[in-house]
Amino acid sequence: MSHPDPIPTMPRSVPGLFQRVLGGGLVLTLGAVMLVIARDYPMGRLYDMGPGFVPVWTGVALCLMGLAILIADLRPQPDLAMPGLHWRGLIFVSASILAFAGLIQPAGLVPAMFAAVAISKFGDSTNRVLPILIYAALAALGGWALFLVALELPIRAFWR
Amino acid sequence: MLEQFMMGLGVVMQPSVLVYALAGVVIGQLIGVLPGIGAITAISLLLPITFHLDATSSIILLAGIYYGSQYGGSIASILLNLPGTPSSVVTCLEGYPMAQKGRAGLALFIAAFSSFIGGMIGVALVVAAAIPMASIALRFGAAEYAMLVVLGLIAASLIGTGSQLRSFAMVLVGIALGLVGADTTTGFYRFVGMPELADGISLVSLAMGLFGVSEIIRSVNSEAPRQTKIAVSMRDILPTRAEFKEITGPILRGAGIGSFFGALPGTGAAIASFMAYAVEKRVSRRPGEFGTGHLPGIAAPESSNNAAAQTSFIPTLTLGVPGDAVMALMIGALVLNGVIPGPRLMVDQPTLFWGVIASFFIGNLILLLINIPLIRLWVLLLRIPYRKLYPVIIIMICVGVYSHRTSVVDVVLTLGFGILGYLLKNVRFEPAPILLGFVLGPLFEENFRRAMLLNGGDFTVFATRPISGTLLACTVALLVYSLASGLAARRRARRAATPS
C-alpha cells in the first residue's frame, strides 16, 4: 500500500547535482566512517588474520563502491528525480516508536502500546482526537489480550 | 528417502503439529494478500513467539507463512493490480487484464493451480536432493563455505532487477552491520560503542526496521487508492481442456526455472518469477498476446515462485547457508531454538528435518484447498484502509523487537534502521541485499579466516580444492556472463540510438 504522497511535502526541485551525488555520497561516507573507527583494529597477517582485517577491507570496498556510484550518477539521467520526503510519516512514526521505547520499562506494556498507537494515529491528517483515543484504548486492550494473555510474553502490563 | 519422508508425514499429521502448519499457511496467505506486509515482516513478528514452541513446530509455522504468502500474493495482483509480494509483481501483467475482462475467477484458479504444481515439484526436489546434498555438505570445509557465500552474495548483486552496483553496495552495508559486536575468533569488540551492542545488532531489529518501519513511514499519510469495485465472478473458474494444454508447458518450465533460482544462494522467488515470465515470452509462438491476459504468463511465474520458495530450503537446511532474507530469518529461528542448521541436522534431528519437509507437502495441499473458498474473505480484507492498520503494525513491531532481547536499545535501533531503509529507498537503493549481507557476512569472515589459517595464508586453496574450485568457477562464469551481457545491451542501445 505504498503510493507516493498526492501532495509532496517538500519542494521536488532539490538542486540537481546534490540529488545526484546523494546515493554514492552516502555509501562513501559510510565506508569512510568505518575506516576511521577501525583504524586501530589489529590487522594480523594473511595466515592469521586479526579482527581488523575484514572491517578494513569492507570499508575500502564501500568507499570504492560509493565512488563508482557517484561517477555513474553524475551523468544526467531522466529517472533520477527523488520523491519528496514524507515528513508527517517520519515525525509521527519516530515519535510513536520512541514513546514506546521510553514507556515500556517505567510504565509497562499497556501504557506504552496506548501511547504508541495514539501518537502514530496523529500522523494521518484526517483523524480527530476522540476517535484516536478510543482506537488507542481498544488497540491497547487487544494487545494486552494477544501478547500477555494468549502468548504469555514475560513483560509487565503496568508500573508497580 | 521415501521412508524418511513417510516418517516426516507421521510427525506432521500429529494434531499438535498440524495446527501450526495450518496456522502458518493461512497467516501466510493473509499477509500475501495484504500489500505492504510481506513474509519478512510477518516472520520477524512471529519470531519471538516461537520461543514458546519446539523447534519443529516453529519452523513449520514460519515456513508455512513463507510459501503461503506466495499463494496469497497473486490474489491482490489479479484483482487490484497491486502485487501483494515482490514475487507476484509479474502476475499483475497478465492477471489484471484478465480480471478486467471478467475472467478473474479463471485467473485465480490458474494461479492457485500453477502454484500448487510448482510447489509440489519443488517439494519433490527437496526430498530427492536432501540426502545427496547432505553427503556433499559433509565434505564442506572452511574454504567451501567461504566460496559458497561469495557465490551467493555475487549472485544476489548480479541477478535481479535493480542496478548491480547499487545491490553490491547494499550487500557491503549489510556485511558492515554484521561486523558490529564481539569478533567470533578473538572476542575483540568491533564498532560496539555501547554495552547493549556487545552481542551485535539483532536480526529482528534490522529486518523490522528495513522492511516494516520504512514502509509505514512511506504510507502513513497517503490517501488509499480509490477502491475500484472488486468483482469476482465465480463462473467459469475451471479452464477448458485446450487451456489446460496451453499451460502445461509453462508450468513445467516455470517449476524448473524456479527450482534452480531457489536452490542457488542469493536468488529467490522474486527473481525466479521474473525469469520464468521472460523465458515464456521468448519461447512463445504468440509473444504478441503477452500483456493482454495470456494464460502462460500467469502459470509460469506462479509455478516458478512457489517452486523457488520450496527449493530455497535445500541450502538452508543442508548447508546452513541462507539463500535470501527470509531464509536468513528461518536460520535465526532455528538458532534461537538451539538447533544449528547444517549437514548434521538430518542425522541429529531426523524428525525435525523430515517433519519440516513433509509439512511443505501438507501445506501446499491445504493451500490448494483453501485458496478458492477463501477468496471472498480476502476481498473483504482488501477493503480495510491502511490508516486503520498501521498503528497496529507499529505496536506489533515494537513488542516483537522488545520481547526478543528485552532491550530498549533494540527498539530505538529498529526506528533507526527504518529511517535508514526509507532514505536509502529514496535514493534508489533496495534494502533486501543488506539483510543477506548481514547474515552471510559473519559466515564468510569466519570461514575465510579459518581457511587462510589452515593453509598458511595461501589464496590458491580456494581454487585447488575440488568443490571450492567449482564454486569459484561458477562465480567467475557469472561475473563474466553478466559483464558480457551488460556490454552487449549497451552496444545494442547505442546502435539503436544512431540511425544507420
Image (spheres, coloured by chain):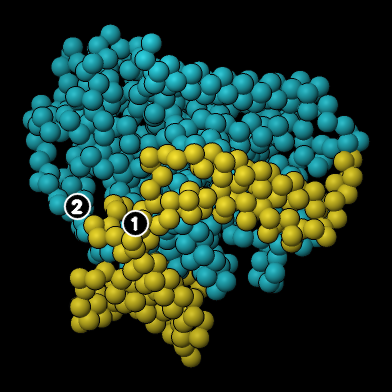
The location of residue A9, given as percent across then percent down, is 31, 64
Task: Tell me what residue is drawn at x 29 percent, y 53 percent.
Answer: A4
B243 to the left or right of B303: left
**Along the line of sight, which residue is nearer the eye, A25 or B23?**
A25
Query: Tag 2's secondary structure?
Result: loop
Q: Are marks 2 and 1 in contact (CB under 8 Å)?
A: no
B3 to the left or right of A128: right
Identify the chain drawn in cyan.
B
Q: Chain of mark 2?
A: B
Q: Chain of mark 1?
A: A
Density class for disc 1 (Cα within 10 Å; few <14, some 14-19, many ≥20) is few
Amino acid beneath label 1: Arg
Q: Nearer the viewer, mark 2 or mark 1?
A: 1
Task: Name the residue that disc number 1 marks.
Answer: A12
- Please identify the residue farthest to the top as the structure is shown: B285
Amino acid beneath label 2: Pro
Name the quadrant containing residue B193.
bottom right
**Along the line of sight, which residue is nearer the eye, B350 or B175?**
B175
